[in-house]
Amino acid sequence: MKNIIHHKTLREQVADAIRKKILYHELEPGMRITESELATNFGVSHGPVREALRQLEQEGLVEYTRNVGCSVRDISFQNVIEALLIRGSYELTAARACAGNISDKAMEEMASILDYMKDMDGSDFTEPIIYDNKFHTVLIHEAHMPYLTKAWSSLDFATFFTFYQQTDHKDSVTHRQYDVHKEIYDIYLSKDCQAICNMISSHYKNSVDYMIKEKGMSEADFPFSFDIIEPPVFP
C-alpha cells in the first residue's frame, strides 16, 4: 500500500490513532477524553497525547470545555450537511476564480492522489478521508485566494464526519472513491469552467442526497436551502 506521508512524528501517530477511535465509534460524540488514559493506552508520555489533542481540536474533531476538559466533538447531522454545502460552494468559487484553467501541476497532483485511491482496499477507513480532502484541496489552491483556503480548511472536519456517518458501509464507500474522483478529474482536464462547475455541483448533490436518504430525510427537513451548490450558468 502506498502512503503519501512516509514519516510521521509521534504526535501524528497518536493523532491518527485517536482519529481511528472516533471514526470506528470507540470514542463516541460527547465522550470525555483524558490524556492519562490515552497515554497509558498507547504506551507514550502525556506530551505527544496533549499535542495530538490540540491538533485534533484545530481539525474540529475534539473540543475543550471549561470545567470539563477535552471531549469528542458532538456535531449534529444537520451541521455535517451544512458544512458540506458550504464546502461545495467554496469549490465552485475556486473553479470560477481560476476560470476552470487548472494548471498542469495541479492535474498531476490530483492524478497522483487518484493512484493512491485506486490502491485502497478498505482496511483503513482513514485513507479515503485523507485522500478525499487532498484531492479537493488541490482545486482550492488553484484559486490563489488565501482567505478562501483558510475558510475551506476550517471545515476539514466535514469530510471526517461525512465518512463517520457511513462507517457501516465503509468497504463500498472506500471502493467507489476512485471512480467518483476519476470522473471529476476527467472533467477538470477539459478546462471548461461550466462543465467543471456542473460536475462539482453534481458531486456534492449526490453526496448530500445519499446521506439524507440514508437517514430517511429530505431537503425539506433542513432550515436552509441547498441551492448554494447550484452551478452558475455562464452566458
Image (spheres, helix red, strand yellow):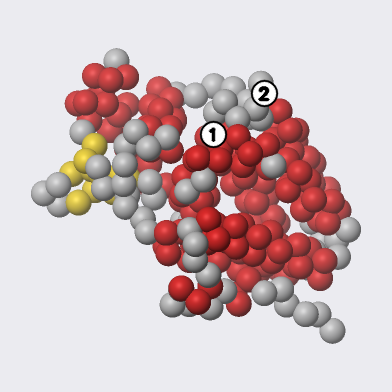
In the rendered image, which quarter is residue 128 located in?
top right
Q: Tell me the kind of residue under disc 2.
A: Lys
Task: Kindly identify the residue that appears in the image at 68 percent across and 37 percent down.
Answer: 175
139 sits left or right of 186 in the view: left
Tell whether 18 sits left or right of 160: left
In the image, residue 117 lies at what x, y percent?
A: 69, 35
Q: Residue 125 carries which label?
A: 1
What's the mark number on residue 106? none
Residue that numbered label 2 is attached to:
2
Look at the picture and state if 216 lies above or below 24.
Answer: below
Furthest-right residue in this view: 190
Rendering quarter of residue 48? top left
Q: Distance between the residues labelled 2 and 1?
A: 15 Å
Q: Which of marks 2 and 1 is nearer the N terminus?
A: 2
Q: Give above or below for 83 relative to 12.
A: below
From the image, which quarter does the N terminus lie in? top right
Residue that extends furthest to the front in the rendered view of this protein: 216
Q: Is mark 2 on a helix, strand or loop?
A: loop
